[in-house]
Amino acid sequence: MSGIAEYDRLDGVALAALIADRQVTAGEVLEEAIGRAERLNPQINAITVPLYDHARKVAQRPLPESPLAGVPFLLKDLGVLLAGTHTSFSCKLFTDFVPNHDSAIVHRYRAAGLNTFGKSASPEMGITASTEPAMFGPCRNPWNLGHSSGGSSGGAAAAVAARILPLAHATDGGGSIRIPASACGLFGLKPTRARNPSGPDVGEGWGGQSVGHCVSISVRDSAALLDISAGPDLGDPYWAPPPAGPYLAEVGRDPGKLRIALCTSPWNGEPVDADCRQAAEDAAVLCESLGHHVSEARPEINAAQFRDAARILVAANVFATLTNRAAAIGKSLEESDVEPITWAMAQSGRKYGAADYANAINVIHHAGRIVARFFTHHDILLTPSMCTPPWPLGVLSLSNPDTNAFGTAINRSIAFSSLFNATGNPAMSVPLHWTAQGLPVGVQFVAPFGDEARLFRLAAQLEAAQPWKDRRPPIV
């Protein structure tokens, strides 16, 4: 292979070390990423807004001291802003939206020397578990091009799985880091609520359910990036408990003997595919072999109340975002502005009142207290990441005319993940299983509120025991 030897086997920390040691330049690493993007993106459609010239200028600047300095990076084309560049939300209403400022988290990425060379694909407004926006077309799973890469951070996951780059920004409001990580065979950690800043434009996303971080090929890249981005911004309405030390230092540290609760039945009652159940059960056996104690248990919530509350919060926020954007460009929100299922969600959000929203907040806060009490008796909760392996393309499209099939697929996608957006607990999907057809299946681990350190220690132990980084899709 031309370019940097073993690029597709190196994580971000390793690439940054090569740059710091002057074995390669940041510009050479960037050109490797761009070359791979130009070769592979036509197959997977993961990058919707290339910023190659922008990144080439940045690569000429001096680098800070940082474990990821000089590493090529993608921002999700949804919710986070990079000054002077288009952010589309995969929605026609944002066709001409070019912000004049950075989001707080993007400012921190730039200060640490990460070099954004593009925006990754997401579904319209981030409201489905697959990335198939009408605006850009479907993002394809590198493991099987006829299948979904997950969502809403599907472009990020597809690009990393294809080894265009080792890690990429992602967000998660109901599973949107963990679902694509599961679908694409990557490590994906959703941090604790408010671990990373959401400002300066908003204080929280989807009533506190949405947070940002990344998908990555290695555990240590995720830890290093969280060290860069974590901590409150001025004016944040609340923030997560401070960590005891750097997250990168937790990688490789002994996690001790953990009390792990195994749960293979989701709260919404959806059926679980045999591969997903097997993935969780095999992970439990692996954990026991590592010295942990595993027993079957799960927190019990009112699933119907929780489902309704989560739907109210998402629909109301989507409706507000769309109507505010329409007003900003001097028009009223119309059905033709969005995809059919987005429109249906917006209309649902229109009908809810202030009391509905307040009650929904109370429901998810109550769920948080139930889960917090659960973790006084257990250190980790282990579940499948999804009820199914990656879906075929089309099922989870926001333009799918079969809304019943869409609804079923959504419920089976978020069945294990969305509760922990509501409760704010950190949770990760770890790539520990592949189907006989070669599709990845992730396993979810959840920790007490504020304890990402415990997840990083366990994840590094699992990574050492059953490595996944060098298992790459056929197109690589």
Image (cartoon, grey):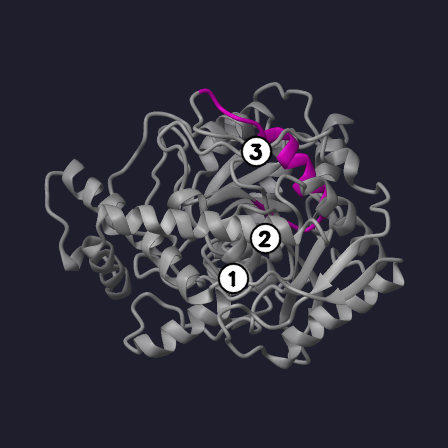
Determine crowd level at label 2: few under 14, some 14-19, many 20+ residues with C-alpha closer than 10 A.
Answer: many
User: Residue placed farthest to the left in the image?
Assistant: 331
- Left or right: where 365 falls relative to 334: right
Residue annotated with mark 1? 301
Give the SS element for disc 2. Answer: helix
Magenta residue span: 214-234
Q: Residue at x 71, y 54 (%)?
A: 380
Asked if residue 12 shows in the view, the reply is: no
Verify CB contact (< 8 Å) between mark 2 and mark 1: yes
Q: Residue at x 45, y 51 (%)?
A: 364
Nearest the camera: 4 or 65?
A: 65
For residue 240, the mark is 3
Whole-percent x, y for residue 200 in the image = 39, 27
Q: Residue at x 78, y 41 (%)?
A: 251
- Left or right: where 106 falls relative to 63: left
Verify CB contact (< 8 Å) between mark 3 and mark 1: no
Whole-percent x, y for residue 183 in the image = 57, 65
Give the SS element for disc 3. Answer: loop
**Separation of residues labelled 2 and 1 (CA atoms):** 9 Å
Verify CB contact (< 8 Å) between mark 2 and mark 3: no
- Left or right: where 183 falls relative to 131: right
Earlier in the chain: of badge 3 and badge 1, it is 3
- Left or right: where 12 falls relative to 194: right
Q: Amino acid at mark 1?
A: Ile
Residue annotated with mark 2? 371
